[in-house]
Image (tube, coloured by chain):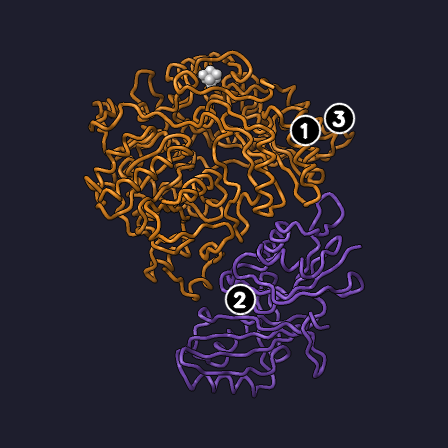
Chain colours: A purple, B orange
């Protein structure tokens, strides 16, 4: 009987600039090195049954990534952790893991609907920054045109980000941003910074921002659970 | 330790090229080693990380307690611009120390069009470009790889070259560096070069003087230092069984060009294709035992977690126990989701059977290299493949369910006429017909890829004058006009690129100034079509007064001194000359692997032997 494990893992400084695809592939290789009984898809070109939650952009680190790993039999949670931890590349660590039902669970991708980020920004002007954030928080709507290779799309940033908390420090500003992930889309933290700089005059160089995901949640009204707690 | 600012990393493409931390990379404390090497590949990360030779050297150096090897690749132009504007010097991916702080910087020379990147990397490292301008505290700049067999165009820039297989030579070099440093660097830089020149396979160009005749040809490259041998002969590993193999290769995060396990079945190839340089440089054939390969494969899978094992060699299908090793590898790893692949196929039905076994689903494309369009021309180049072989192989492929075939050819081969060009088109059409015969309907896709022949040193065609660019382009257009069927796609190489390759492949020391001029004008990444600027090279030739056609298009006479005559791959010049005459007579020469020795000189001269497990067992 196949079993499934859900793991909370990190994407640390060492792998900050690794793309989501490369991050996934490096974990898949780590699993293969463990010799754990990973399950593979049927067919001639088998794929390891491993699934990740929301993708991270290049340059974004994380303290809260989640993955589901399917095994063909159960070596026990301790054995899974002990086998995998030493095989993971530097910067990727296991925070927690537990077994979840092997079937009947919606995909990780489908359940998470809120992501929290910490953004460190070296500032070029002090008070102007807090004023810019105040204006963003007070705005009822913030129209923004998202551009990607497929085309342009106008969105309201406020549909995804209601409020941004700021903590000014000696070497810059620390922002706490919560972004809603909806069935029709979301916004990337880099785009939020761009909006703040271009539309609200935040005095910062967007390229110099360091973004770290601090949480990924299944939010429902007041309740807020991590994928490991649902 | 160099720290790249986040703003830089967020602006450049693929920043993971520059951030290191790959698993299996070896980080040593520089204070604890006597000889430190920065192993440099003069191209972008994804290309350089795919190269087996550097993985081998990295492994051999790092297993020495007294030495350390780190990696460095050419930064992509966007990163180069950032580095120059932020004042970040070229540095390695392990300790992030400047390359200039290493004892040795070692470049691998895989293709001529990477030479400007070598100059650019030295410049980014803050190391004087010319050997003569370096002081005792600059790193020793060394190079190896196939292009080192005509080292002359790089003679001004490289302190010494290592010819041939470096498994043993690199140990000698590391030991010599450590010893020289511990002794307090006696004699300084030149003192070390004299020690290096005594190592077999090492060529120190500064210890040789080139002289020229009135007509511009070479009159000789003569040793001018007591430590320098008149002829430097390549190193060769007699028995690969004993040679160290990198079973713990650095594992990239980025998807690299060859992102899989590379299992080297054997080295060398004695089929004797007359255009092929590798076939001469890596003689003789030496196979690993199947048991050894299975053990290496197991270690590689355990240490990498890769899902594919590629059986690499110059001509993998020639491995004597191929069928056996393929099925045993598939068996051993099928539960771990690891597949086996063959990078090159021979043109026969045996190869199709194997291809079927290894890549059950990927029916998308099979690649064959008939190289020439007519039997006559295939006899000239000694490509022992007949039209019947191709028909059988393609027929077997179509019966097995493949529908796409890729065919590789060359144009501009010696004795070629327009009939041979038409033969390429006819062969492609024949492949379409075979599909119809097998399947009763149309539906095959044939892609024809045509490169322009570049005569290479140490081959029977080393004397041949390359077709000029106009002629190559005329042949390309002729061929293009012959492909009317939409099921055949046709691609060809830029003739300017092939011309420049030919210039540098058979050039002499006078090209050093051209290289320098081209680099100053902005040449870099010449192997990448988006960066290759021929006009700039024309300017460089004009500026330096060097005529490129003298090197590319001129047929050399048999008695001319060639710029690589003092560098030996162990194969006699007389053998190459004989082969050239045989070629012009369209007379084939059989493979010496199982047949008679053709007395090319390698086995006799270097005291090595063919190792072929299919025969001895
Ligand atoms: S010396 Fe003879 S056997 Fe050895 S590689 Fe040359 S031709 Fe072949």
User: Disc 1 versus disc 3: distance between alpha carbons?
Assistant: 18 Å
Residue B277 seen in render: no
Q: Residue at x 48, y 41 (%)?
A: B51
Residue A21 image-quadrant placement: bottom right
Q: Is the N terminus of chain B in the top left, top right, bottom left or bottom right quadrant?
A: bottom left
Question: Same chain for marks 3 and 2?
Answer: no
Q: Residue at x 69, y 61 (%)?
A: A77
Q: Earlier in the sequence, mark 1 or mark 3?
A: 1
Q: Is the C terminus of chain B in the top left, top right, bottom left or bottom right quadrant?
A: top right
Q: Nearer the viewer, mark 3 or mark 2?
A: 2
Kindly identify which residue carries mark 2: A60
Q: Which of A146/B212 is in front?
A: B212
User: Disc 3 versus disc 2: distance between alpha carbons?
Assistant: 56 Å
Chain designation of label 2:
A
Residue B37 percent coordinates (x, y): 36, 45
- Ligand 1 contact, mark 2 (Cβ < 8 Å): no
Question: Same chain for marks 1 and 3?
Answer: yes
Residue A7 seen in render: yes
Residue B221 shown left or right of residue B26 in the figure = left
Question: Neighbour class for label 2 at 10 Å: few (<14), some, many (≥20)?
Answer: many
Mark 1 lies on a secondary structure that is helix
Residue B247 percent coordinates (x, y): 53, 41
Question: Same chain for marks 1 and 2?
Answer: no
Task: State whether residue B419 is above or below residue B513.
Answer: above
Residue A69, numbered label: none
C-beta proximity under 8 Å, tags 1 and 3: no
Residue B437, numbered label: 3
Residue B7 percent coordinates (x, y): 43, 66
Q: Which of B396/B297 is in front?
A: B297
Kindly identify which residue carries mark 1: B352
Residue A211 percent coordinates (x, y): 52, 70
Chain designation of label 1:
B
């Amino acid at each position: 009987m196949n079993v499934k494990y859900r793991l909370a893992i990190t994407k640390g400084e060492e792998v900050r600039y690794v793309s989501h695809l490369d991050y996934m592939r490096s974990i898949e290789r780590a699993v293969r090195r463990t010799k754990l009984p990973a399950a593979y898809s049927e067919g001639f070109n088998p794929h390891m049954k491993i699934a990740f939650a929301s993708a991270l952009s290049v340059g974004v680190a994380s303290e809260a990534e989640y993955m589901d790993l399917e095994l063909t039999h159960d070596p026990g949670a301790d054995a899974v952790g002990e086998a995998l931890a030493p095989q993971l590349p530097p910067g990727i660590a296991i925070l927690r893991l537990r077994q979840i039902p092997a079937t009947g669970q919606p995909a990780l991708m489908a359940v998470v609907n809120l992501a929290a980020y910490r953004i460190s920004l070296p500032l070029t002007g002090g008070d102007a920054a807090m004023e810019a954030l105040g204006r963003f928080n007070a705005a009822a709507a913030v129209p923004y045109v998202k551009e990607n290779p497929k085309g342009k799309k106008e969105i309201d940033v406020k549909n995804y980000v209601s409020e941004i908390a700021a903590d000014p420090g000696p070497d810059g500003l620390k922002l706490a941003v919560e972004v809603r992930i909806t069935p029709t889309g979301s916004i990337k933290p880099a785009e939020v910074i761009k909006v703040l700089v271009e539309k609200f005059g935040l005095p910062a160089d967007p390229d110099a921002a360091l973004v770290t995901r601090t949480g990924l949640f299944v939010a429902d009204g007041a309740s807020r659970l991590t994928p490991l707690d649902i | 330790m160099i720290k790249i600012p986040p703003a830089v990393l967020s602006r450049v493409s693929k920043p993971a090229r520059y951030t290191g931390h790959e698993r299996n990379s070896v980080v040593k404390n520089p204070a604890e080693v006597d000889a430190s090497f920065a192993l440099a590949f003069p191209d972008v990360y994804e290309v350089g990380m795919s190269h087996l030779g550097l993985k081998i050297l990295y492994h051999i150096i790092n297993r020495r307690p007294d030495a350390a090897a780190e990696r460095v690749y050419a930064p992509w132009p966007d990163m180069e611009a950032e580095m120059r504007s932020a004042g970040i010097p070229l540095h390695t991916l392990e300790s992030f120390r400047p390359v200039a702080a290493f004892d040795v910087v070692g470049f691998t020379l895989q293709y001529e069009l990477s030479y400007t990147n070598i100059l650019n990397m030295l410049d980014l490292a803050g190391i004087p470009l010319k050997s003569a301008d370096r002081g005792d505290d600059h790193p020793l700049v060394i190079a190896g790889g196939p292009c080192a067999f005509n080292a002359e165009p790089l003679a001004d820039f490289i302190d010494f070259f290592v010819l041939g297989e470096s498994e043993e030579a690199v140990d000698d070099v590391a030991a010599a560096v450590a010893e020289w440093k511990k002794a307090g660097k006696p004699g300084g830089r030149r003192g070390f070069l004299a020690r290096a020149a005594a190592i077999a396979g090492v060529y120190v160009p500064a210890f040789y003087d080139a002289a020229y005749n009135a007509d511009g040809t070479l009159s000789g490259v003569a040793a001018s230092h007591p430590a320098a041998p008149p002829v430097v002969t390549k190193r060769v590993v007699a028995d690969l069984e004993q040679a160290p193999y990198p079973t713990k290769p650095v594992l990239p995060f980025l998807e690299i060009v060859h992102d899989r396990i590379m299992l080297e079945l054997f080295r060398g190839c004695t089929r004797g294709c007359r255009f092929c340089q590798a076939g001469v440089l890596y003689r003789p054939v030496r196979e690993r035992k199947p048991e050894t390969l299975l053990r290496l494969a197991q270690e590689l899978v355990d240490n990498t977690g890769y899902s594919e094992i590629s059986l690499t060699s110059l001509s993998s299908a020639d491995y004597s126990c191929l069928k056996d090793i393929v099925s045993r590898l598939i068996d051993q790893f099928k539960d771990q989701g690891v597949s086996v692949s063959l990078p090159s196929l021979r043109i026969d039905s045996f190869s199709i059977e194997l291809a079927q076994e290894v890549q059950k689903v990927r029916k998308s494309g099979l690649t064959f290299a008939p190289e020439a369009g007519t039997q006559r021309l295939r006899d000239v180049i000694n490509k022992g493949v007949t039209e019947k072989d191709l028909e059988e192989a393609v027929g077997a492929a179509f019966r097995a369910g493949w529908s796409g075939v890729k065919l590789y050819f060359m144009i501009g081969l010696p004795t070629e006429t327009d009939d041979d060009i038409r033969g390429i088109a006819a062969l492609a059409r024949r492949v379409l017909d075979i599909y119809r015969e097998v399947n009763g309907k149309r539906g095959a896709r044939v892609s024809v890829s045509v490169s322009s022949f570049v005569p290479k040193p140490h081959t029977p065609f080393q004397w041949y004058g390359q077709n000029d660019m106009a002629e190559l382009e005329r042949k390309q257009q002729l061929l293009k006009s012959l492909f009317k069927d939409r099921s055949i796609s046709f691609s060809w190489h830029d003739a300017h690129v092939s011309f420049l390759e030919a210039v540098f492949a058979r050039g002499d020391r006078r090209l050093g100034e051209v290289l320098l001029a081209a680099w100053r004008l902005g040449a870099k990444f010449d192997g990448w079509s988006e960066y290759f600027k021929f006009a700039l090279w024309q300017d460089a030739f004009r500026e330096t007064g060097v005529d490129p056609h003298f090197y590319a298009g001129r047929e050399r006479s048999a008695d001319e001194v060639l710029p690589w005559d003092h560098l030996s791959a162990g194969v006699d010049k007389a053998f190459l000359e004989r082969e050239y005459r045989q070629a012009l007579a369209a007379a084939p020469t059989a493979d010496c692997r199982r047949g008679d020795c053709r007395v090319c000189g390698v086995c006799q001269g270097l005291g090595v032997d063919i190792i072929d497990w299919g025969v001895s067992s």
